Image (cartoon, grey):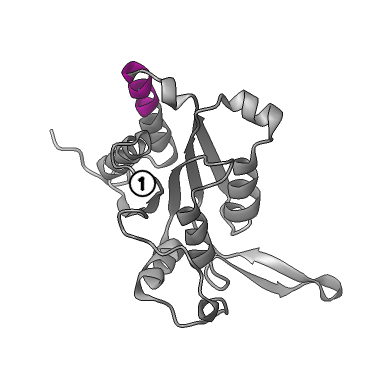
Amino acid sequence: MKIMVVLAHPSTKSFNHAITETVVQALNENGHEVMFHDLYQENFDPVLPYNEILKGSQLDPQIKQHTDELSNADGIIIVHPSWWGQPPAILKGWIDRVFRTGVAYEFRDGEAGVATPVGLLKAENSLVINTENTPQDIIEREFGDTLEDIWNKSVLTFCGIKNFHRKVYDQVIISTPEQRQFWLNDVRAMVNQLFPQASGMRISA
């Protein structure tokens, strides 16, 4: 399968990078084709220009590559920290520019002349992995889980992905090396469950 993996964290020494390295390694070991993008390392421009808004607009080559990969992806994995209950700005801009009408969704005529949104993505499974420094139960109790609403309701499910999964690792700032290794083992297990070994793949002795 073709799996799109997107990372949004500015530090290459971050736990987000360690998570993503584990994700990519597990996918490769399972025989999948990985389409990986580190948005900060690629200097992705998150600003959506006006001339790019309309369906069918001429796209920058980098954006065209991302939209093509998104359309062809059999699975999507996104890794990022929670900043003020939201994705980093570079990742929000990636959504704005890549999850385009005609690529990720479109509007069709519905009943009584109401435009009905239709998701176009073919990916069966999506996985969003977030890191937090505040305990997740406190976040949900005090502020609500805004990232769940953004990714599940507003983006991925809206765009047609049938199975949405999300994992949060919290209190990362005080975590020990042993705790982080436990989490990375958990990441590998999730990837193996959602994107198991490709059929027909031969394991050498």
- 30 magenta-colored: no
Mark 1: secondary structure? loop
Q: Between 124 and 62, which is closer to the camera in this rendering?
A: 62
- Residue lying at the far right in this picture: please name it: 112
Using the rendered view, name the quadrant where residue 65 is placed: bottom left
Left or right? Give the position of 8 relative to 30: right
> In the rendered structure, which segment of residues is drawn in magenta?
177-185
Question: Which residue position holds label 1?
Answer: 10
Q: Position of residue 146 (x, y in %)?
A: 64, 42
Label 1 is placed on what type of residue? Pro
Q: Between 114 and 199, which is closer to the camera in this rendering?
A: 114
Q: Main secondary structure of the magenta part?
A: helix
Which residue sits at x=40%, y=27%? 186
Query: Please, is residue 98 above or below residue 109 in the view?
Result: above
Q: Position of residue 1 (x, y in %)?
A: 36, 53
Left or right? Give the position of 134 relative to 67: right
- 184 magenta-colored: yes
Query: Please, is residue 73 above or below residue 10 in the view?
Result: below
Which residue sits at x=44%, y=39%? 194
Using the rendered view, name the quadrant where residue 25 is placed: top left
Q: Dividing the image into 4 quarters, which one contains the C terminus?
A: top left
Which residue sits at x=25%, y=40%? 29
Q: Position of residue 137 (x, y in %)?
A: 62, 24
Query: Please, is residue 91 above or below residue 53 in the view?
Result: above
